[in-house]
Image: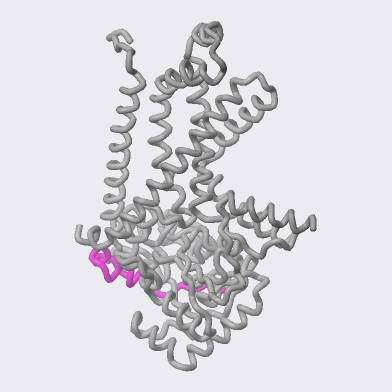
Amino acid sequence: MDLILEYQAQLLSGTWVTIRLALISLVIAVMFGLLGAWAKLSKNFVAQKTAAAYTTIVRGVPDLVLILLVFYGGQQLVNSFGAMTGMWDYVEISQFAAGAGTIGIVFGGYMTETFRGAILAIPRGQIEAGIACGMNRFTIFRRIIWPQMVRYALPGFSNNWLVQIKSTALVSVIGLQDVVYNGFVAGRSTRQLFTFMFAVLMIYLVLTAISDVGLRWLDRKYSKGIVRTDHG
Amino acid sequence: MKFTKLKTTCAAIALMLGLVGNSALAADLRVGVEGAYPPFSWKEADGTLKGFDIEIAEAVCNELGRKCVLVEQDWDGMIPALLARKFDVIIASMSITEERKKRVDFTSKYYNTPAKFVAKKGSGLEISKAGLKGKRIGLQRGTTHQCFMEKMYPEAELVLYGTQEEVFQDLAIGRIDAQFSDSIAADDGFLKTDAGKDFEFTGGDQHDEACHGPGAGMAVRKADTELRDELNRAIKAIRANGTYQKINAKYFEYDIFGG
């Protein structure tokens, strides 16, 4: 316990990195998810196929492999391109950008499917009714699709988010000093690995518990006017 | 003119992608270190890096008249990070081996300590082909010790770990019969601690020239021969002027430079 207090600055700065990483990659994931869902449901052939390729690749390859590929492979690519064209000598891909970008893009794949399913769950007749009322596409999205999509998507979204927050731990491999990296280094430096792993575990539990509260609030907000019955 | 425009565009894109400009031409020497391998390198509560490797790095930079910028790097990504130019030299107790020489250039050694087995006191473990047959031997993967075990004792069952600390952890709880590692890492990191009080070295020094090589060196990219030569000169200089011996005495009871 004393050791944890002694190393608390390390653990806290790591936790802050983890939180920032999780939130930024969540924003990226939601953007890619909405874009992907739109593309998959659109009548445009190219958009459909691109989205299909995207979800197949990012959901089919381990996150860790992609992170390593972007960070080390991407860096060598950037270096060779710079050397080839003589435009730069060395430009560094930051660990944070590589980590947040990769995790965001990977989880965008899962979000795509979650959002797509949620949009499909909205009865077609409602959208037709919107058209009949003379709403334009944006109004239909804002007033009919979005509120219901969020409600249908929330259970899947919550799952994705919880997995994603834990996936941020993968970035410790590329040396980004998140809570896991700092916990491990402190654990090895003091030779008290278990103590620090336990601290890291508690930090993750607190983070997921807080997000649970937020997700429940969203659920209540978007379930307004919906009555829950015993038989579903 | 056109080329200039392309240049600007590319620079703008690079900036948008979050690539931060950082020229390697600066006089600072960026040193890749591990920070999780006591007593060679570890991290204090306030975040500062300490240890034999760290002090040697500082001494070498001092000798070269350049400022050291320590870059922490996980062991698994050490060589890829060097090749990707995240830093210019690795000073992280990396043993000089033929395998690694295919990808990086080494300076001459800056220390050489023998490898040893550690087992429970009175285990009666015999270090021989017959004695190790089917025994579970733990070690850090990707090290010279893995090469040694696979070559000399293929009969043993190897259990590989990401870090040395995990090896000690599993040895203490009895998941492996013995562990094989650098003797200093084992002595300082385990035998002298509470968890290691029921364990001891067994079987004496182990050495295989092909696997273990001449010792631990500093690694640079193959193109950086000039830096390698400068580092060699610096290692010689700190050996000659007593800086090395001063650092050595802080951590170890005998000269770990080796013969």
How many numbered marks have been drawn onto this rendered protein structure?
Answer: 0
User: Where is residue B158 shown, x and y percent of the image?
Assistant: 45, 55
Q: Residue reaching furthest left?
A: A2
Residue sitting at x 50%, y 40% = A104
Nearer to the camera, B153 or A111: A111
Magenta segment? B186-209
- Is A206 included in the stretch rendered in magenta? no
Q: Is residue A155 left or right of residue B236?
A: left
User: Where is residue B20 shown, x and y percent of the image?
Assistant: 56, 58
User: Where is residue B140 shown, x and y percent of the image?
Assistant: 44, 60
- Is B196 included in the stretch rendered in magenta? yes
Residue sitting at x 53%, y 29% = A34
Residue sitting at x 50%, y 68% = B32
The quarter of the image holding the N terminus of chain B is bottom right
User: Where is residue B167 shown, x and y percent of the image?
Assistant: 37, 59
Q: Quadrant of residue B188?
A: bottom left
